[in-house]
Image: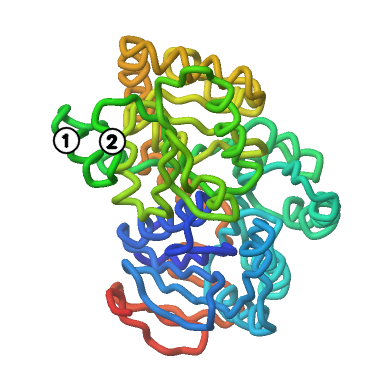
């Protein structure tokens, strides 16, 4: 297929500048395909409805209320009634629809729209069941998986999963084995790289106001219970003589617990370029999260050459990690207290882990291979040769540098 004739619709509840792993993956996929000549649109949430072009990608934001995340730490935007008609129009325009996760209103709208337009869709399921502290949230989550989630998984032409636990979940929901694909996320290994010299690391530490000589363990992610930020605080508090400091990059309801603590540094939310500098400023990466696909921040930390500590999740088995590349730990404070203390006191082991982590990331987490796998999957589900759109009203003959939306308006790439 000529990629320049391909129209791809990505569907995700969030998109940058909102900070989070799923939306970063969607952005990298969308921009990467646009750079290869595909016409790419993302339908997502926003404070108000708008359509802009960013990095060659048409971003359609539908007005949504995000109070559940602000007040409860639950990333679940509630959309205006404009979502379904907008999704219907863009699904009719697209050759293929790529839905990210099944828990969100954007995904349900895509399910309804593709059923009407017969546009083939693929699903990336990022996470499994999240053991949220709220029984209500857990109950709603299970209800969604049993209804809309089940339909999304069963009707998808391909189901991409990030780990073995998520693959088991999608199998229980009805995904056929021949349609299920393990597809790790990619990482920009040029951006997320180790410091080239001690001077570069010192400069990064100076920029963030971090101690120049003390071992630093970085946490990057949303400050919500499932990410385990509170467990790190507990683990350090249990160490009678901690020889390292904790550094937190992210946002969420837990930020108040970080301010004013001895040995704890809070950087707030960081865009990718500054987050890459934060990785280079630190020695270790610590993420005791649960119910993840495979955390994008773990991949970024490995690419940045940090000694990584994360949860020992059986779902991570397909990644074949061993202690040379990352320490996989039980999600208990004593285990994390010991592991952090040992690595903080052992620069030689940290150095060896840094080398192995970087080597692994270069071999396993490249974006070119990820995008190639996507294009292969898209081609496999298309109902017609390139340039022949299905009979749902989509227009043909789009010029290489234009992007015709469902309303027929031409949107020039490169403007906003």
- Residue drawn at x 50%, y 37% is 184
Which residue is the site of mark 2? Answer: 280
Circle 2 residues within 10 Å: few <14, some 14–19, many ≥20 = many
- Residue drawn at x 60%, y 30% is 234
Where does the N terminus fall, quadrant-wise? bottom left
Give yes or no for contact between labels 1 and 2 (Cβ–Cβ under 8 Å). Answer: yes
For the residue pair 320 and 267, the one nearer the viewer reads as: 267
- Residue drawn at x 53%, y 75% is 46
Total number of numbered discs in the rendering: 2
Circle 1 residues within 10 Å: few <14, some 14–19, many ≥20 = some
Q: Could you tell me residue 159's position as x and y percent?
A: 64, 46
Q: Tag 2 or tag 1, which sits nearer the N-term? A: 1
For the residue pair 305 and 235, the one nearer the viewer reads as: 235
Give the CA separation, mark 1 to mark 2: 8 Å
Q: Could you tell me residue 270's position as x and y percent?
A: 38, 53
Q: Could you tell me residue 250's position as x and y percent?
A: 47, 50
């Amino acid at each position: 297929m000529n990629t320049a004739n391909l129209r791809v619709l990505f569907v995700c509840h969030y998109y940058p500048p909102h900070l989070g792993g799923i939306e970063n993956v969607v952005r990298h996929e969308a921009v990467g395909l646009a750079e290869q000549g595909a016409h790419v649109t993302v339908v997502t949430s926003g404070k108000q409805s708008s359509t802009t072009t960013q990095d060659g990608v048409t971003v359609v934001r539908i007005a949504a209320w995000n109070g559940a995340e602000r007040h409860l730490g639950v990333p679940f935007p509630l959309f205006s009634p404009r979502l379904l008609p907008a999704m219907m129009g863009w699904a009719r325009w697209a050759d293929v629809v790529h839905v990210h996760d099944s828990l969100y209103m954007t995904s349900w709208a895509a399910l309804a729209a593709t059923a009407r337009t017969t546009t083939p869709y693929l699903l990336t399921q990022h996470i499994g069941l999240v053991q949220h502290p709220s029984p209500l949230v857990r109950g709603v989550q299970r209800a969604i998986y049993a209804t809309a989630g089940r339909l999304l998984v069963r009707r998808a032409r391909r189901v991409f999963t990030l780990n073995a636990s998520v693959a088991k979940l999608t199998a229980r929901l009805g995904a056929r084995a021949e349609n299920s694909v393990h597809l790790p996320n990619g990482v920009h290994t040029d951006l997320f790289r180790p410091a080239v010299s001690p001077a570069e690391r010192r400069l990064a530490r100076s920029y963030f106001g971090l101690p120049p000589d003390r071992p630093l363990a970085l946490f990057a992610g949303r400050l919500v219970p499932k990410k385990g930020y509170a467990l790190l605080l507990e683990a350090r508090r249990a160490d009678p003589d901690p020889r390292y400091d904790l550094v937190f990059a992210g946002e969420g309801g837990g930020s108040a617990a970080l301010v004013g603590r001895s040995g704890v540094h809070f950087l707030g939310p960081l865009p990718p370029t500054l987050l890459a500098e934060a990785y280079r400023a630190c020695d270790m990466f610590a993420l005791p999260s649960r119910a993840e696909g495979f955390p994008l921040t773990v991949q970024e930390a490995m690419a940045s050459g940090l000694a990584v500590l994360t949860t020992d999740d059986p779902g991570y088995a397909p990644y074949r990690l061993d202690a040379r590349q990352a320490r996989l730990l039980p999600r208990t404070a004593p285990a994390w207290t010991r592991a952090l203390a040992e690595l903080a006191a052992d620069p030689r082991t940290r150095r060896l882990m840094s080398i192995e982590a970087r080597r692994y990331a270069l071999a396993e987490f490249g974006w070119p291979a990820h995008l190639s796998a996507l294009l292969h999957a898209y081609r496999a589900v298309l109902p017609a040769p390139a340039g022949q759109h299905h009979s749902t009203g989509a227009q043909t003959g789009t010029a290489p540098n234009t992007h015709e939306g469902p309303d027929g308006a031409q949107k020039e790439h490169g403007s906003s």
